[in-house]
Amino acid sequence: MTPSLSYQQMSAFYGTSQILHGISFEVKPGETVCLLGLNGMGKTTTLRATMGLVDRIEGEIRLNGDALTGPTYKRSRMGITLVPEDRKVFANLTVEENLRVAIRKPQNGTGFTMDDAIRIFPRLGERLSQKGGTLSGGEQQMLVVARAMLANPHYMMLDEPTEGLAPSYVDAISQAIIAAKGLGIGIILVEQSLPLAQAVGDHFHIIENGQIVKSFTRDEVLANPQSLIDMLTVD
Amino acid sequence: MLAVSLALSGIVLGSVLLLFSLGLTLIYGVGRIVNFAHGALFSIGAMLGVWLSGQGLPLWVTLILTPLIVGLLGALLDWAVLARIRDRPMVDSLLLTFGLALFITGVLYELGGRNVQIMPIPSALEGAVTMFGLTLPVYRVFVSILAIVLATGLFLFLKNSDWGLRVRAANDDPEMGACLGIDREALMHSVVGVGAALAAISGVAAAPIFTAYATVGDKILILAFMTVILGGLGSLRGAVVAAYVVGMIIVFGEGYFGGQMALMLLFVLVMAMLINWPRGFFGEGRTE
């Protein structure tokens, strides 16, 4: 069984309203899969369903071949974590505590450590004793990405990590994503910024009304960058 | 002289409220449960304390045993009952814990809680002590110091232990905590356990002053809700300040204007806070 996180005809529901209508794709270690599409199409729901944060799913999510079920914290301990769109910094914890609470040692090797986090995001190193809630938006985003990586997950999901950020922060976040790929972490990236998606993505899925309507590989996008843009332009 | 004596009573009441409210606010913060049964846990503590003392146990043993027993009961209660309605709408937990409170109170009635029971002050803590030129009853000073030491201990533990880090993280955002591997269920059992233990120890420590009966915790519960609202829902340091503010308002209000007036004064303050500053003294409480 090759390791992967895969979605097989997954539908997701909040109460009686169905958000996703049978989506299928997979992520392998070290790969980045970009979910693209307009707002309200089901990208965030895909990520939340993976963490067990929707009311109900049909179809399956499989982790290394086994059905992924159970409470959120168990999924996290199996090596899946989420960087949500609204960041969810622990506002009353210091930056250092925000990072420390997430630390999970990998099975082998040292994995991603606090020192690594501070090397990629020096700004966090300067603010370790500051309360998380007092950071700027960009600093909070760096904090939550570093926090997720300290859990040394096998799969990391990022929901619009660069939305509304200044270019210098976008650079820092993309450095982190590249570092995560280097560590063999499989990434699902929901992103509006095409340059970032194109820089790190291996597979691209366009989601419309809860379905994957088109998929591209990295090579296809590199050969014809306009193809993605066409799919995402409102006409 | 009246003012000084009232101030001490205010500190005693504030300290009891502090221990009691810290548990209440933690249970709300981590589990989003407004625990109406918290007052009943105070009553259990008071009555169990009187009973254990009646068996000839010294006060210090009673002060350790009571919170231990009630703490375990609290953890059990969370596992058996409260866990079933986690993340349901707030009204479910209100009704369920209210029912639990009635149930526990009923049991306490049957166990002799209809009558006011007196807990004697041990001879070592009887009498008065003269401090800063003031004559103060030893036991009241003892209760205040005990509460302050325990509250400080809890804060240090929350600040420095792994358990405390997880509790504070889940208090800030339970869902994100779960996304980072925090087992909120197990955490909640321990949090309700600690909260119940704190309610019980405040009940037993206050028993020689407030006496013990089936509903002795009811008044404390109402004052504790005021405390938690003034401090901000889920805000721990807010609860510390608010506990003493409430204690002082009640005691001075009763001393100068009579008991009903004191409560009314407090209600007006709480309403003003709810309307204008719903996040409490430090602006860090939650609004739902």
Image (cartoon, rainbow, N blue to C red):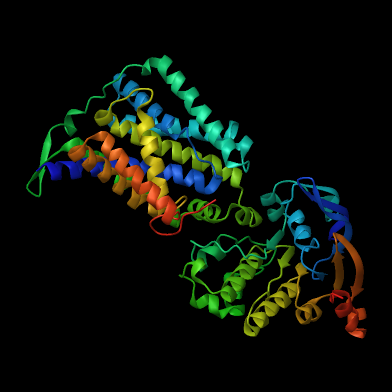
On the rendered image, what quadrant is the N terminus of chain B found in?
A: top left
Relative to the observer, which residue lies in front, B31 or A111? B31
Establish if A203 lies above or below B54: below
In the depicted structure, whether residue B210 falls above or below residue A187: above
Q: Is residue B154 visible?
A: no
Image coordinates of residue B89 in percent, x first then y, are 61, 42
- Position of B1 with respect to A19 (left or right) is left
Q: Is residue B247 left or right of residue A178?
A: left
Residue B172 spot, x, y in % from top left: 53, 56
Rendered view: B245 above or below B67? below
Q: Residue at x 29, y 33 (%)?
A: B206
**Image location (x, y in percent) of residue A117:** 60, 73
Quarter residue A189 falls in: bottom right
Say which of B220 and A68 sits in front: B220
Name the residue nearer the viewer: B17 or A117. B17
User: Hey, which residue is sitting farthest left in the picture?
Assistant: B133
Please provide percent x and percent y for residue B162.
Answer: 51, 54
Relative placement, left or right, of A8 versus B56 is: right
Q: Which residue is at 62% across, 65% downward?
A: A87
Kindly indicate the quadrant of the structure image that contains residue A116: bottom right
* Picture mark count: 0
- The residue that appears at 39% across and 47% down in the rendered structure is B271
Between A96 and A171, which is closer to the camera in this rendering? Answer: A171
Residue for point 61% across, 66% down: A147
- Examine the rendering and report whether any part of residue B7 can be seen: yes
